[in-house]
Structures are given as structure tokens and as C-alpha cells.
Image: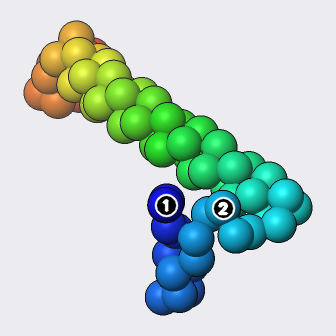
């Protein structure tokens, strides 16, 4: 028998109504999508840091930038 815990209360999954089972499945789906989006956001943040570092390395040094003005 599979049980789930919601708000510190255990429920037998088989004993839940169809509506409750559907809501639980939807909640699991959304949680999985949020985890996926968070993982993607971490990848994009890492890429952003890399691009910012590459840009910083490609820019003229501060002393060079000042002498050109």
C-alpha cells in the first residue's frame, strides 16, 4: 500500500477519492516542472557568468580605456 504525507498526515493513496488522486498527480507534475525549470535556470546562470567573464576579458583594460578618451 502506497502512502503519501501531506501536512504531516499520512494517507493511503488507494483510499483517496479520484479527485484527490488527480490533484496529487497534478501537484507532482508541477513540482517536477519547477525542478526542471530551476535546473535550467542554474544552467543559464552559469552560462551568463561565463559570458560576463569572457566579455570582461575581451574589454580593454581600464588604463587603456581611459587613455583613448
Left or right, 50 with reference to 37: left
Can you tell which mark lies on residue 14? 2
Q: Is residue 23 visible?
A: no
Disc 1 from disc 2: Cα separation: 7 Å
Answer with the quarter of the image where residue 54 lies. Answer: top left
**Label 1 element class:** loop
| Residue farthest bottom in this picture | 8
Comparing 33 with 3, the one in front is 3
In the rendered image, residue 63, in percent from the top left (x then y), is placed at 12, 27
The residue sitting at 49% across, 61% down in the picture is: 1
Can you tell which mark lies on residue 1? 1
**Label 2 element class:** helix
In the rendered image, residue 60, in percent from the top left (x then y), is placed at 20, 16
Answer with the quarter of the image where residue 51 lies. Answer: top left
Q: Is residue 54 visible?
A: yes
The residue sitting at 74% across, 69% down in the picture is: 16
Seen in the picture, residue 4 relative to 53 is either above or below; the reply is below
The answer to whether the residue labelled 1 contacts the one labelled 2, judged by CB atoms less than 8 Å apart, is yes
Residues packed near mark 1 inside 10 Å, few (<14), some (14 to 19) or many (20 plus): few
| Residue farthest top in this picture | 58
Seen in the picture, residue 66 relative to 13 is either above or below; the reply is above
Amino acid at each position: 500500500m502506497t502512502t503519501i504525507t501531506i501536512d504531516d498526515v499520512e494517507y493511503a493513496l488507494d483510499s483517496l477519492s479520484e479527485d484527490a488522486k488527480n490533484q496529487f498527480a497534478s501537484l507532482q507534475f508541477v513540482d517536477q516542472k519547477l525542478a526542471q525549470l530551476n535546473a535550467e535556470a542554474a544552467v543559464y546562470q552559469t552560462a551568463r557568468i561565463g559570458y560576463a567573464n569572457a566579455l570582461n576579458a575581451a574589454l580593454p583594460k581600464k588604463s587603456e580605456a581611459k587613455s583613448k578618451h
